[in-house]
Amino acid sequence: MFRDLPKLVIEDPSAPSIAFVANIRMEDLYEKLKLLNYDAEFIQELKMKHINRHYFVVPTNPGEQFYMFTSLAAWLIRKAGKKFDPPQESDDPNSTISDILEVLKEIDVPVEFPPNKLKQGVGEQAVYVLDNLADYAMKFLKFKWEKPKILPDESIAEAEVEDDAEIILEKVEEEITAEYDEDDEDIVHVDDITKLYKESSANTQKREKILESTMDAEEWKLELERVLPQLKLSIDADTRDWKAHLEQMKALHAGMGQNLSGTKGQLEKLHADIGRALDKINSRETELNRQLEPQLQELRILQEELSKVKEQYRDVSGGVTERTRTLNKLTEELEQVKKEMDERGSSMTDGTPLINIKKTIANMKSEISEMSIRIGVLEYSLMCSRVRDSAQLREDMKSTNSTVST
């Protein structure tokens, strides 16, 4: 995997590939998701959308990417054996992010960035969170790498479909070769070619033996004449060849002309049968109309009478509705009058108003006595003030006279 490459790039901030660390880590995360059976358990069971190798690196749709980020994080947390409810689109983003970061703290994953960096659902921080959750899920499931097993090459059996009228040329050649290959020493295999190449590499100029065919030419010709009628080569026409298209159109046109003669007679016969059937239907319809004319006339008269009765019913029902409305109004007025009469009767037999009047008179008398006391106090205060003013005025006049005499 690409686990060590991002670390090396981060150690050297001046590296040219520093801007693509998130891309490399996202590809690493994508491979881990495949190992965790992401296609079956996340995409198919939860009905989610497929993501590509750079989905959480390139911002395209913030809302959709944030929902995919939180859903994938919740799925990885559940894969790690922890309880985590699948997020909904209506959930509070801050609470969802805080729950995910709380799980990261529980599994001892350092978080050195603010939580608001995850609100977009894309970027280096989002890939960092998902990558660490995927690592923890793989550790929880005890995933281990195994050495690759190289299986031996096996010949794959191919289904052969043979047609009686058409035999493939290669098949015929194999059958002919199989009839005459009785001596295995004359067969040249791949291993023999390799051995011969090694022997000839020592002395390329010297040839110990020249391979010669041991088959009789006359027998070969006889066998070829025997199978020659069965050989048939089918060459597919080029779809861009206009001549082939033209020949095909001519053949189709000729076939249509040949088939049209028989089909035309059948269509004409069918047309004649349909015409006769329509004539019979029209004649029967005319006869039925003639026979049912009195009944139809009676039906029309009854329909007219029914319409008149319905009109009268509407008029009468309109008058009944108006009278019902008037009756309801009079009933309401009667109820109001009864209510007023009941109130007046109860007030005439009830002594509560007299008691209230007596209480009011007593309250008024007490208030009058209180007012009289207050008036007396005020008169006394006024008289005292007048006495003080007159005494002060006399003293002022004495002092003025003494000053004038001096």
Image (cartoon, grey):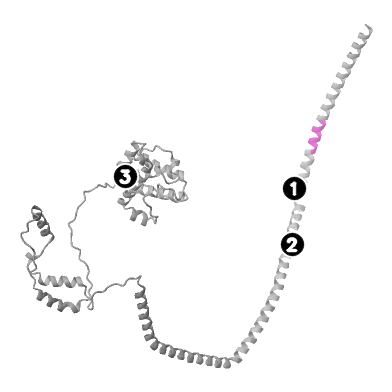
In which quadrant of the rendered view does residue 39 lie? bottom left
Whichever of callouts 3 and 1 sits on the residue coming sooner in the sequence is 3
Query: Which of the two residues, 208 or 73, is positioned nearer the viewer here?
Result: 208
* 390 versus 120 height, above or below: above
Task: State the residue at coordinates (70%, 76%).
Answer: 315
| Residue most extreme to the top | 406
* Amino acid, disc 2: Glu
What is the chief secondary structure element of the magenta stretch?
Answer: helix
Along the horizontal axis of the image, is 326 left or right of 391? left
Q: Secondary structure at mark 2?
A: helix
Q: Position of residue 316 (x, y in %)?
A: 70, 76
- For label 2, the residue is 333
Percent x, y of residue 120? 45, 45
Amino acid identity at mark 3:
Asp
Q: Residue at x 21, y 67 (%)?
A: 158
Bin the neighbour count of mark 1 within 10 Å (Cα to Cα): few under 14, some 14-19, many 20 and up: few
Q: Nearer the viewer, mark 3 or mark 1?
A: 3
Kind of residue sitting beneath label 1: Thr
Task: Please check the rendered image and state whether residue 355 is part of the magenta-colored stretch, yes or no.
Answer: no
Residue drawn at the location 76% of the way across and 41% of the way down: 359
Residue 371 among those drawn in magenta: yes
Numbered range of the magenta stretch: 364-373
| Residue 114, x across and y down, in percent | 43, 38
Q: Which residue is mark 3?
A: 135
CB atoms of marks 2 and 1 within 8 Å: no
Earlier in the chain: of badge 2 and badge 1, it is 2
Foreground residue, 19 or 233? 233
Q: Secondary structure at mark 3?
A: helix
